[in-house]
Amino acid sequence: MSAQAYRLPQGGRIDRTRPLAIRFDGETYEGYAGDTVASTLLANGVHLMGRSFKYHRPRGLLSVGTDEPNALLSVDRGPGRVDPNNRAGAVEAVDGLVTGSQNRWPSLGFDIGAVNDLLSPVLVAGFYYKTFMWPRSFWDKVYEPIIRAAAGLGVAPEGPDPDRYAHRHAHCDVLIVGAGPAGLAAALAAAGSGKRVMLADEQAEPGGALLHDPRATIDGLPAQDWVAQTLAALDGHENVVILPRTTAFGYYNHNHVALVERVSDHLPLDQARDLPRERLWQVRAGEVVLATGSHERPLVFADNDRPGIMLAEGLRVLVNRYGVAPGRQVAIATVGSSAYTAAADLAAAGIRVTIVDVRLAGDCAADVAFAAQHGIEVLAGHTVVGSKGRLRVSGLVVAPLRADGSVGARRTLPCDCVGMSGRWTPAVHLFSQSRGKLAFDAERDAFLPGTHAQAERSAGACAGDYDLAACLDAGFAAGAAAAGVSEARTFQASPTRTGFQPMRVLPTDADPGRVRAFVDFQNDVTAKDLKLAVREGFHAIEHVKRYTTTGMATDQGKTSNMNALGYVAGLLDKELPTVGTTTFRPPYTPVSFGALVGPSKGALFDPVRRTPIDPWAEAHGAVFEPVSLWRRAWYFPKAGEDMHAAVARECAAVRDGVGIFDASTLGKIEVVGPDAAEFLNRMYVNGWSKLAPGKCRYGLMLKEDGFILDDGVVARLAEDRFHVTTTTGGAPRVLALMEDYLQTEWPDLDVFLTSVTEQWAVIALQGPRARDVLAPFVSDIDLGNEALPHMSVREGFVCGVPARLMRVSFTGELGYEVNVPADYGRAVWEALWEAGRELGITPYGTETMHVLRAEKGFIIVGQETDGTVTPDDVGLGGMVSKVKPDFVGKRSLARPDLVAGGRKQLVGLETEDPHERLDEGAQIVLDPSAPVPVPMLGHVTSSYFSPACGRTIALALVADGHARMGETIHVTTMAGFARATIRDTVFVDAEGVRVHARDS
Amino acid sequence: MRRFNLANLLTEAVRGHEGWGRQWRSPEPKKSYDVVVVGGGGHGLGTAHYLAEVHGITNVAVLEKGWIGGGNTGRNTTIIRSNYLYDESAHLYEHAVKLWEGLSRDLNYNVMYSQRGVMMLAHNVHDVQVFKRHVYANRLNGVDNEWLTPEQAQAYCPPLSIDPRARYPVLGAALQRRGGTARHDAVAWGYARAADARGVDIIQNCEVTGFRRDPATGAVTGVETTRGFIGATRVGVAAAGHTSVIMERAGVRMPLQSFPLQALVSEPVKPVFPCVVMSNAVHAYISQSDKGELVIGAGTDQYASYSQQGGLQITTHTLDAICEIFPRFSRMRMLRNWGGIVDVTPDRSPIIGKTPVPGLYVNCGWGTGGFKATPGSAHVFAHTLATGEPHPINAPFTLDRFRTGRLIDEAAAAAVAH
C-alpha cells in the first residue's frame, strides 16, 4: 500500500509541509503535523487497532475523541515513558512515536484470545457468578488466574516514571469549560467585563465542532474564520486565560473544579524534557459556564462492532479536520438528520456514500432532498440487520421496513466503512458531578441539566441546544450572566440539520437470542446481555450496569449509557427516567496518578522536620529514625559499633558522666493569660493552681473517654504564663484539643495558646556531671541544689543567649533542659559539647533515651499506652486530682469498667535468660500449652538490654499485674515462648536519689 | 430456584439463556412480618438469609430505600481479613472469614472470595511494635498472621518499593495469607437470591420513615414506610451511614458520626498486583480486581457529612502514598472515584445487639471496615434477632459499652507514633 493512500488531496487542518512518521505494531506510518495517531493510521488505511476486553473481537476506531471505547493503544515515548490504554483519536501524532495494540496474542490480526468469541454463548453477562465454585479451592488457584490473565487491557507501566508533574491553584471569576461555539461565545461575552476569565478545552485547538464544519457560517464568516477572529479578540484581553489541551475532569463543592493540562506529550520527543508532562489545575471559580458539547450515540444492530464502523460525526472530523478518507465507499446508517451533513461532506471529498435511514421516506423528505442535491443515494425506511467482514467491514446488511413494522428481504451494501448516527447525548458529566439534578427531555431523548446546585450554567449542546445559532446565543447569554454584564447579542448562523426518530435497537428479522448487537463496545456488552439481566431481575439501572458491566469501561459509558438505559426501559416497558439515571463520578476522562500526585513525591511526599541541631548530628555520624514528621538522631555509632554497642556506650556515659541529647522535637505550647492555671486544671488530671512560678510539674492529659492522651512537663514561668511540653508526635493534637475546648466549651476563659515548638531548641544535659558542663555558661542563675532543685525552671542566659533553663530529668539522673531560641540552638549545643569533651560528654539518641527511661519505669505515651490505658493502669493514679470539680476525662474515669478488676496494669518483666530480649508487642500467657484460643494476660510494651542492670529488662501491661509480683509468665517469641518473672517497673535507683544529686 | 452450576450454564447457553428466572422477586410488602430488617446491604440481606437458613424464620422482609447493595456494599474496596488485635474483634472477624471461605457454595453464587493475602506495611519502629503485637495475639487466637522482612514483603508483592531512602521506608510487614478480596455486588445479590428462595421478601424503593411502638410497653410494633405501614415485633436496623438517621426516628440517639470515605479504581491493566497491601501510616489500601483495575482506598474526610462526595485532596493524598510505595504506578490513570458514607463509633468497633427500645435491634458502626465482616455480622445478628439475645461472638459489641467503658478500641491499638 502506498503511503497515505487514504489522505485526501487537500483540506484539513494538518500541516502538509511538516511530515512525520509514527510506528504501530512495528510498522511505520507517515502523517503530518496536526494529525492524531488515529488519523495517521486511517490515512494509511489501517482500521484494525485493537481487541475487545472479553471476546477479543477485532476492533477499529469508533469515535475520534475521548469517548473512544475500542482503539486503545499503548504509547511509547522512550524509556520509562510507556503508557497503556491511550485513545488513538486523542493522542497527537509526534514524529518517532511508537504505538502498539493491546490485549492480543500473538498478534493483532491473529489473536488466540478470540476463542472467547466462539464461547460467547456461554460467556454471557454474569456467567462467572454461576460457575467456578467447584471444587472450593479452585477459585483463586485455577479459575481466577485464568480470568485475570484474559482480562485487563494494556500492560501496566514499568516505572519509575521519569516525568514530572506540576500543580497549579488558581482563582477566577468565570471558568468556561469547552471552547466550542457556546464556550467561545461565552468567553466573548465575559471578556469585556474585565473579570478574570479562564477558558479550558480538552482539544489541541479551540473551536470544537466548528473545526470540522466547512459549511457553517457565523455572522457571514465561515465558521473557522469566526473561530480565528474570536480567538484573536480574546487574545487581546489580558483578563482571559485560554488553556488548550486542558480537560476539566472533576467538579467539587464550592465551585472547585479540577482540570488536567497535557503540557508536553504533544511536543517532539526530544523537546519535551524540560517541561512537566502534565499540570493539575485546581480552580476556584466564582461562576462556571459548562459548554461541554455532546457525544454521538452508536446504533445497536447485529455485528455493529467491526473495524471500519464508526460514528458518523467522526467521519466528518476525519475528512474535514484531518483530510483523511475513512473509506472509499461509505454507508451511513442513521435515525436522524445530522448524518446527512456528514454524508454531504464525504461526498464533497469524492467518497461514494449511501445513506440508510430508518425513518420512513415521508418522515425524512427534506433530508432526502438535501442528499439528492449532493448526489447521495438514500435508502429510506430501511433497517440495518448486520454487517460483513472480519478485520474490516466489507458490507452492511440492510432490509426494508414494511408498513406493519416487519422486516423485508435482506441485501448487502458493499462498503469499506460505515457511519452510525443514533442522535446526541449531551455531555452532562460535570453538571452531574456538581450535584445538579438531571431532567429527562423526551423530545431530545436525553438527560439535560435540571436543577442547579452551584453557581453554574450550562450552554450549548450539553444543554440540548444543537442548532449553531442557538448554541452561540445561549453561550453568550451564559457568559454575560456569569460575568455580570447585561449585554445581549444574537448571532446569525447557518442552520444545523437536527432532528431524529427515537429508535433504541434497530428492528431486525434475526433471532434476538442469537445476534450480538453491541451496546458497550469495550466491555462487550450486547443487547441480549441487557435482556438477560432484566430477565434475572436486575431492574435498577445501577444493577444492570453492575451485572453486565455496561458503562464501566474506560470510556465510562459515554457512548453506551443512553443506549443501555433506553433499551432497558423498553424491556421493562417503563419511561426511561423511571429506570434511573446513571451517576456521573469524577474523573470525566481518566487522569494519570502522576498528575494528581504532582510534586508530592520523594522528599516532598511529606515535609521532613529537622531540629537546629540536626546538621550537627548528621556530621557526627548519627543514624536517624522518623518520629511523626521529624527525623530524630537514633544513636551515634562510633567506627565499628553496631546499634547495640553504641547504645550501651551512650547509656553508660549518661549514668556515669554526662550525655547531651537533642530534645527540640518536644511539642511546646505557651499558655498565657489570667485564667491559664484554671485552663490547665481543666485540661490535665492533676492540679496547677498551687504550682509556684519557677516550678515544673509532670502533667497527664486524658481523652474524654478517660484514657491517656498525652503527657509532658509543664513549667510555670509566671502567675499567668506556662510553658507546656507535649510528646513529639502529640503536639498538633494536643494543641487542637486545647483550642477546641477553649473556643467551644470555655470561651469565658481568658487564655491564649501559642505553639512554640519551632521557636525553642532544647538541649538536654543528663548525668552526674551535667552541672559541671553547664555551670561555666550560666552567669545569672544559681544552679545550686537549694536554689534550683529538681523540677524547677528559671529564665536567664546560657552562653549569653536568653534561655529557659529547666532542671528536669527523663533519665533518673541529674539533668537540665536548656531551651534557647532555635536560631542559637546549634551554637549553644556546640559550645556545651566542646566544653564537655574533657568530661567525656557523649551525644546520645532516642534509643538510649528510651532505655534510660525504661530503666526508671517512666512511660512513653503511645508505647506503654495505646488509647485504652488509664492513669491507674500505668501506676499514675495518684496524680489524678480528687478535689478538682472537673477535668477532661474525669467522668469517664468513673465508668464501671474503668474501675473494675482485671484491668491491665504496667509491670516490669525479667526474663529467665538474662540475654533474651523480648519482642515489643509479644503476648503474655499463663499456660502456653492451652488450646487455641489461648487466653492472653497482656503484652510487652518496652524491651531493651539494660547496661546498668547487665541484663535485659521489659515493661508490660498485664491483667491484674500489680497483684502478680513474682509470678512466672510465658511470653511469645517468633520461635515459641520465653519464661519471665513479673516485678516492679523501676530497675535502676529504686529510691530515686540520683536525680537530686544531693552529694554534689 | 434454578441452581447455578456449569451444567445448567451450558444448557442455557444452547437455548439462549431463556431459562434463567429472576434472582429475587419484587413482591408487594405484606401487612406484617415476623422480622423486618431495615437496610438492603450485605449485612441486612445476609441477616435475612441466616434468619431463614439457620433459624427457620422465613416470614422476613428486607426494606431497602434504594436498590439492594447500593450503599457501602457496592462502594467499598472489598478487603477481607481477620487479623484484629483484641479477642472480641478477632473472634468476630475470624467468624466472618470462615464463613467467607464457604460462602459461594452456601449461597450457590460465586462471590469470588480470593485469598490473595493481605499485607500491612510497617513504616516506623512504632508500626513494627504494633504489628508484631497483632501477629502474636492473632496466632494465640488461631488467626493466621506472620511477620515479613522488607525483602520477603517485596517478594510477595513485587511492585513494592523497599528503598531504605524512602520518606517512609518499609521496615517490615504483617501478612495474613487467608485474607483477600471478594466481588462486592455478588455478596448482596447472592444473599438476596438465597434469602428470596427461602421466602424472604426483598422490598426495594421502600424507605423507613418512622417506627410504631406499643404505648404501654414501648416495644416496637412495626415501621412506617414510603410504601405504608409494615408490622413487625422484631426490627433489625442495618443501615450503615444512615443508621443514626433511622434510629433517631425510633427515638434512639446513637453514638455514631458519619463521614464520607472515598475509593477509586484505575484503568484496567494485565495482572500486575498479586495481593492486597495496606499502609495505615500513609493511608493507602490497594489491590487489583479480576477485571484488572487497581482498586485503591483512601481515608475518611475530616468533616462529618452525608454527601457521597469527598474532597479531591483526600484522593490526591492517597495517590501520593500509592506512588510513593509503588513508584511504577505513577503513569496509571484514575478511572473512577467515588464516596460512601461510613458510620463511626467512638471506639471504631461495631455495635451489634439490643437497643433501649424492646424489639428493636441494631447492627452498625462498622466504620471503614464493614464489608469484610458481612457474613459473620449477618450470622450473629440473625441469631440476636431470632433469639432475642446476642450470640457469644457479638455479646461484647453492645451499645451499652460506651456507658460502662468496656471499649474495644482497635484504632487506639494502632495508636499514632510519637
Image: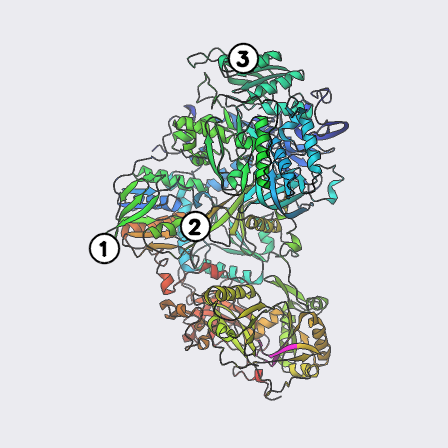
Does the magenta segment cover residue A550?
Answer: no
Above-or-below relation of A893 to A4: below
Left or right placement of residue B343 versus residue A991 in this view: left
Q: Chain of mark 1?
A: B
**Which residue appears at 40% of the width and 63% of the height?**
A935
Label 1: which residue?
A: B217
Mark 1 Cα within 10 Å, few/some/many (few <14, many 20+)?
few
Label 3: which residue?
A: A379
- Residue B185 lies, in percent from the top left, at 44, 40
Lower position in the chain sequence, tag 1 or tag 2 = 1
Work out whether residue B40 or residue A667 is closer to the camera in this orientation and state it.
A667
Q: State which region is magenta.
A: A803-818
Above-or-below relation of A25 to B54: above
Residue A659's disc is none
Of marks 2 and 3, the one in the foreground: 3
Tell me whether the residue at label 3 lies in contact with that at label 1, contact meaning CB atoms closer than 8 angstroms: no
Q: Chain of mark 3?
A: A
Left or right placement of residue A329 versus residue B374 in this view: right
The CA span between labels 3 and 1 is 77 Å
Locate the N terminus of chain A and report the quarter of the image it occupies.
top right
Left or right placement of residue B208 versus residue A568 in this view: left
Classify mark 3: helix, strand or loop.
strand
Q: Amino acid at mark 3?
A: Leu
Label 2: which residue?
A: B370
Q: Amino acid at mark 1?
A: Thr
The CA span between labels 2 and 3 is 58 Å
Mark 2 Cα within 10 Å, few/some/many (few <14, many 20+)?
many
Tell me whether the residue at label 1 lies in contact with that at label 2, contact meaning CB atoms closer than 8 angstroms: no
Q: Amino acid at mark 2?
A: Gly
- Residue A664 lies, in percent from the top left, at 63, 70
